[in-house]
Image (cartoon, helix red, strand yellow):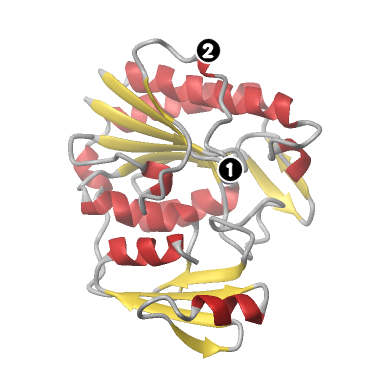
Amino acid sequence: MKVYISVDIEGIAGISHWDEALDNGSDYATFRTFMTNEALAAIEGARAGGATRIVLRDAHETGRNMDIARIPDDVTLIRGWSGHPFKMIQHLDDSFAALVMIGWHGAAGNGGNPLAHTMTGRFADITLNGEPMSEFLIHAHLAATCRVPVVFLAGDDAICTQARALNPAMGTVATKTGHGASITGITPARSCRLIADGVAAALQSNLRDHALPQADTYVMDLRFTHPHLAHAKSYYPGARMIADDTLRFEHDDIYEIARALGFM
Ligand SMILES: [Zn+2]
């Protein structure tokens, strides 16, 4: 069984400030260690759940965060960014049985995590068919085009709630809840224990139960933090302004939605 594990940092246990999340931040070194620990817990759980091949995607900022010296030698690494619209799940294809997300977080505009955003800081909020478009939502739909289900997600409470609403069978570990610029949540050590157990259980569940329904058409509305950004990006083919600060892009293929997002 081939399993893809995609790891971000803003949803890992304990993290609460950009100084801990960005590579020039004063406390980044500590939190990249915690990010690596959660990835290792997911790898341990994947093996216990029956994974025989594991691909590990570093999906935060530079794509070069985790300490790869600590990753088992039979795991395939994906680091950096190619520009491919699959972004945080680059090289996912129909040879994989399942997708696992670790350290994922709430969408732009969500109050459930001081570090909530979608892809970049340029969006005040984004919706997909009227629903807040988190990085989880777009990547879960992209994975579904390869018939690969998201079976497990660890991240902030807001994104766990959105994930379970979409797929009630999904295993989740809620690491924290945001309260303004503060958080309450579990420790990194407890998060790792829950992730290892949760990933194993998710992979042993009936993977067919995790299938995501595909929509006939997708409408993405992007509200930018500044109207001049919306204006500049309105020249992307098919994009149209529906307000001074908001662009709409519609397509029946989620891949084209992801491609457009990549150029925004
Ligand atoms: Zn990130």
Residue 204 horizontal/vertical position (percent): 27, 28
Q: Which residue occupies 43% across, 29% down?
A: 198
Q: Quadrant of residue 12?
A: top right
Reading the image, the residue beneath label 1 is 61
**Vertical side of 71 occupied by 224: above or below:** below
Q: CA distance from mark 1 to mark 2?
A: 20 Å
Towards the viewer: 172 or 94: 94
Q: Which residue occupies 37% across, 61% down?
A: 258
Reading the image, the residue beneath label 2 is 70
Q: Is mark 1 within 8 Å of ligand 1?
A: yes
Binning the other alpha carbons within 10 Å of mark 2 as few (below 14), some (14 to 19) or many (20 upward) gives: few
Report the amino acid beneath label 1.
Glu
Q: Which residue occupies 61% across, 38% down?
A: 175
Report the amino acid beneath label 2.
Arg
Q: Can I make out residue 181 in this image? A: yes
Residue 224 horizontal/vertical position (percent): 61, 74
